[in-house]
Image (cartoon, rainbow, N blue to C red):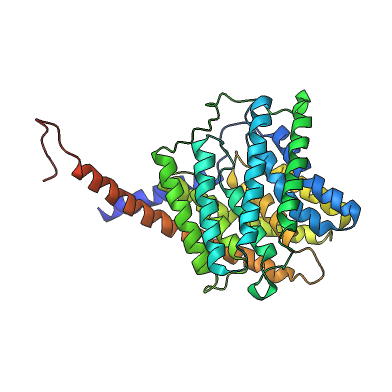
Amino acid sequence: MKKRNVRHHIKRMGHTAQQVAALNKGPWRWAVGVQAGFAMGLPVALFTFLGNQSLGLMASLGGFTALYCAARSTRERMLALPLVAAGLVAASAIGVLCSGNAWLSMAALVVVAAVACIFTMGSRLGPPGPIMFILVAAVSSHLAAPVSSGGAAVAGYTVPMLVALGSILAYLAVMAMQALPFLRNPAAALPPLSLRIRLDKTGRVITARIVAAVMVAKLAASPLAAHRAYWVVIAAVAILQAAKDRRLTTVRAIQRVLGTLLGIVLFEALLFVNPTGFLLVLIIMALQFATEVVVTRNYVLALIFITPLALTNTTIGPNANISVTMQGRVLDTLLGAAIAMLVLWIVESLWKKIYNASKASRPQKQGQVNNRY
């Protein structure tokens, strides 16, 4: 019996390893990559030209607008992306308004997480899901927070305005490229978008997990000396939003950690170039392009490009401690993955208990046999 169990576990581990490394079916998203690269790079290029690249990096948060509805028609994107842009600006404003207090900041992030989950899943908006709204709120809160709280003390009104500018540039870039057949991503046969927000059972479970993970990550980040609390939050959310299935979520956690470690290696290689000015703009565009091309095929490949992109954005400036930031990225990712798996098990157990209790309390139909005992 023991040998059989050992063989079973080895077989499962081998299957998990295959899933981590496997390429999912589907095309390489070249057109989406081009659109995303330009959307992310335009605001950075604009402010680099104007002599203040750091403002461009903040404005690039609005570039996430271009990532949504990539598999939908031009008409659907034309109508849906302004709503996405408005949501990103609202998330940024909420993050800024609550940045002065740690408890308010956590409450704001929980609210943004819940609303973003309901909006993206309930309207069938699709990938990249709620994570970008949560990321924008968290980064905006960090930028506007006082230095004494570990923030950057950027003037509060500045961040949402820059996000709005970045969103507008992203929208214009997407619409312009959608007009060109060779840069238009083919539309898939998807259910229509709907403003009648409705969450199915899977959506409710994922929302519960994400909200719980945001709370736990924010509470744990400070006592556990996380380098950037929002990195912990984003790692946990990215793992939990992928699927309801426990096995697939576990695969996602392994991919997140492995991809981050490999991405650190690429970032160290980029440091030899010491990119500045417009060379940095090109690297940001290339990394975002590569991310969107591969993200649906294999998440490890995507993280190889996402990690140096995140580190590039956070190590600009003469006072940046690059080695500490790289170490912090790894440790924060590990902490986020651990929190995601903990929340996965706890929420799943609670959900089963609630479901069984509600099932047991339902009145039985006449003639139905109760087999509970």
Within the image, what quadrant is residue 151 found in? bottom right
The residue depicted at 62 percent of the width and 51 percent of the height is: 91
The mark total stands at 0
Judged left or right of residue 216, residue 134 is right
Q: Position of residue 208 (x, y in %)?
A: 43, 50
Q: Position of residue 340 (x, y in %)?
A: 47, 57
Within the image, what quadrant is residue 321 found in? bottom right
From what the image shows, is residue 204 above or below residue 193? below
- Seen from this angle, which residue lies furthest bottom? 148
From what the image shows, is residue 105 above or below residue 61? below
Judged left or right of residue 363, residue 271 is right
Nearest the camera: 177 or 261? Answer: 177
Q: Answer whether residue 153 is visible to the viewer in this image.
A: yes
The residue depicted at 60 percent of the width and 39 percent of the height is: 296
From what the image shows, is residue 315 above or below residue 204? below
Q: Position of residue 1 (x, y in %)?
A: 24, 52
Within the image, what quadrant is residue 315 found in? bottom right
Q: Answer whether residue 14 is visible to the viewer in this image.
A: no
The residue depicted at 56 percent of the width and 23 percent of the height is: 189
Nearest the camera: 108 or 306? Answer: 108
Nearest the camera: 105 or 252? Answer: 105
The residue depicted at 65 percent of the width and 30 percent of the height is: 79
Q: Position of residue 305 (x, y in %)?
A: 69, 50
